[in-house]
Image: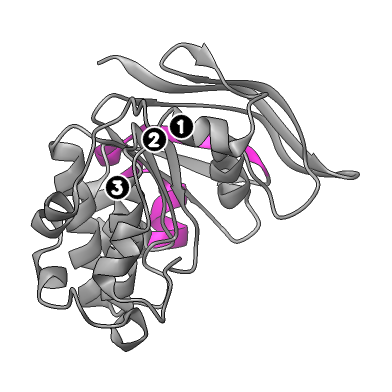
Amino acid sequence: MNTLLRVSDLRVRYGHSVALSGVDAQVGDGELVAVAGANGAGKSTLVNAVAGWSRGRATVSGSIELGGREVVSLPAHRRCKLGVVLVPEGKSVFEQLTVDENFRMVRPPRHATGKRYEIDDVYEVFPQLRERAHARCATLSGGERQMVAIGRALRAAPRLLILDEPSVGLAPRLVVEVLQHIRALVEGGLSVLLVEQNVKAALEVADRMYLLEQGRVVGSGSAAEMRDDDRIVSAYLGRLAH
């Protein structure tokens, strides 16, 4: 498998506070890689650093390569043009616009390097949204809004789709449904980097997982290996997991 994203010795500081310290990670072509960890472990900092943006004034060092090209010094909009597309936590949709209007507001970069998803393609991925195409997003369920947020990201022609906590606030049934849609995208060839609080559900769809603690990678492996990792079992799966 070819490596699409390679993160090497990534370090992120906010003033004197160290958020990430020497993180190495990678995502292959057509692979779903999940990132797990407690609150404050550095999960969002990692994906935000890959996407090239931050809520605060961050100092970033190390290497971030996309398809062999170094992008760590590029601003977020340049990375987006290269196919790095982030869906941040919080279901980023325009609530007063309809589903269809949300999709039409996003157009792929002129020289898109990722897969182009036309609006009909997005409705093929999320068929239930076709029935709600002319409904304002304010009237949608939490799961439907998350699907719209992901659909908007697909319209930007991603090579690497980054999802930060897509299941926040969703009922368990909807968590499974959204993650299954994401897995279907991966089966279609898309690469996904996923931060997910529901570790059990993430392990059902991920190919590999990284475990972060205090800004460092303390464990990594295939989904099957991480399912048997004692730290994952005790913190996220419970004793009955075995």
Check disc 3 and give the amino acid type.
Leu
Picture coordinates of residue 11, whole percent (x, y): 71, 31
Q: Does the magenta stretch include residue 221?
A: yes
Q: Which of marks 3 and 2 is nearer the N terminus?
A: 2
* 139 over 149 or under it: above or below: below
Can residue 200 be seen here? The reply is no
Q: Is residue 115 left or right of residue 96?
A: left
Picture coordinates of residue 32, whole percent (x, y): 29, 38
Quarter of the image where one finds residue 120: bottom left
Quickly name the residue at label 1. Answer: 81
The region drawn magenta spans: 215-236
Quarter of the image where one finds residue 58: top right
Disc 3 to disc 2, C-alpha distance: 12 Å
As drawn, the label of residue 109 is 2
Q: Are marks 1 and 2 in contact (CB under 8 Å)?
A: yes
Quickly name the residue at label 3. Answer: 154
